[in-house]
Amino acid sequence: MNEIAQDLNNKIQEENPYVYELLSTLGKELYYPKGILTQTAEAKQKAYRFNATIGIATEKDRPMFLPLIQETLADYDPKDLYPYAPPAGKPELRKLWREKMIIENPSLTNKSFSYPIVTNALTHGLSIIADLFIDENDPLVLPDKLWGNYTFIFGVRRGAKTISFPFYTEEGTFNTKGMKEALLSKKDHGKAILLLNFPNNPTGYTPTEQEATDIVEALKEVAEQGMNLVVISDDAYFGLFYENTIKESLFGRVANIHPRILAIKVDGATKEDYMWGFRVGFITFGSEFPAVLDGLEKKTQGILRGTISSASHPAQTFVLNTIRSTEFQAQKQEKFEVLKKRAFKVKQILDQGDFNDAWDYYPFNSGYFMCLKLKGVNAEALRIHLLEQYGVGVISLGEGDIRVAFSCVEEDELKDLYDLIYQGFKDLSEQNS
């Protein structure tokens, strides 16, 4: 093992051996190499005559660029577009995102957590976490209502064994008891990775204040029974809280609650700031131990250096300038209201009772999506029928659930959408009778 990696491991182990035990074999071997980037960083500080270190081209003390590109980006300084960004991201963006997190998550006040590390959006962030903490057959615990890509990221890539529990109780609330039982079912393994996604894809559900309190208490109880936990908050749809939900990430409430629990937040500008194609995400670690935060950041930088090297500099600059703008909050609130009205319109349509023979709907209060629980019709058969006969696209989940993204349907067209889904249901019901 490289001596730098060993040194990081020793420091983590001295401050918190539980986090060291959570690391995968790969995670223990990772480090940030003292190579070209380190030498370049030193040269940037001290090479006042000539800096002949980094592999970019310059011209008249500026990054070299093609004028035909710069013409479309005239409002931006070339230095904020063309050079490589640091592996962990632009320092000013990391600082600003951290400040934003504290404002939006009051529970983070007086908590110890890292500066966010920039990733190529959330999928990349999740894959980094998988590399750091998942060995083959390590348990990944998550609700049965989930984003299908988790299975690929953690299972196919890293060999995790998925342990699922029912998302909802019979009363339609978050199933904290099922979560706790799923975690404790792997107590003999010694560790587990818990992945929670709120607002949830596909259900559009976020816990209430009481549910969030119960979740945190359950996690503490599991840790007190001797299990080491990585608790991931996938906050892709952060901020889109429409009703009686917590209005912050669970990350702030889980961070620092127990030495055996490592809280990790994965978020980004992609969905919450309507910048999907820019691919700017963040990983943030929550720990009260400075050596743990330092070690995890350096190991994450090692993964970045060994995969993408660094995330897009122009995209980071666009996000940074957007958040700094005085118009940012007002414009973001305007889009929030549009989505909130669509969510309320969906409930109004469904609560009229016109479709009760075809489906029930799962509770939803946030995010982009909601789910229908079909009565007697196969979800995949309905999806294909709607696509081929009515030009309507929805997502089938398992045998009997349909996910509908109200986020991409105008409010005044939502009734037509559900009418067509209902017509498709009736068509298949008649065929089956």
Image: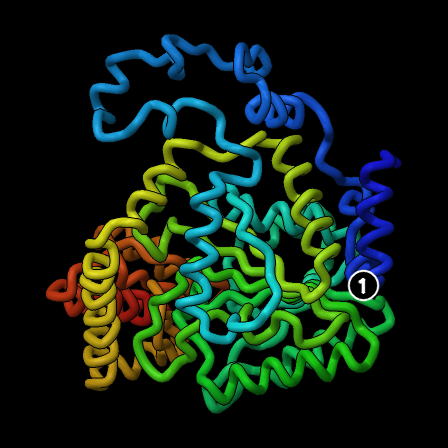
Identified at 40% across, 22% down, the residue is 82
Q: Is residue 109 shown left or right of residue 299?
A: left
Q: Is residue 42 shown left or right of residue 423?
A: right
Q: Is residue 162 above or below residue 323?
A: below
Identify the residue position indicated by label 1 in the image.
16
Instruction: Locate the C terminus by quadrant.
Output: bottom left
Circle 1 packing at 10 Å, graded few (<14), some (14-19), many (20+), is some
Identified at 40% across, 80% down, the residue is 245
Residue 423 position within the rendered picture, expressed as x and y whole percent measured from the top left: 22, 67
Instruction: Locate the N terminus by quadrant.
Output: top right
The residue type indicated by label 1 comes to Asn
Front in this rendered view, residue 270 or 138:
270
Identified at 23% across, 64% down, the residue is 333
Front in this rendered view, residue 378 or 415:
415
| Image quarter of residue 44 | top right
| Image quarter of residue 185 | bottom right
Front in this rendered view, residue 399 or 330:
330
Q: Secondary structure at mark 1?
A: loop
Identified at 73% across, 59% down, the residue is 161
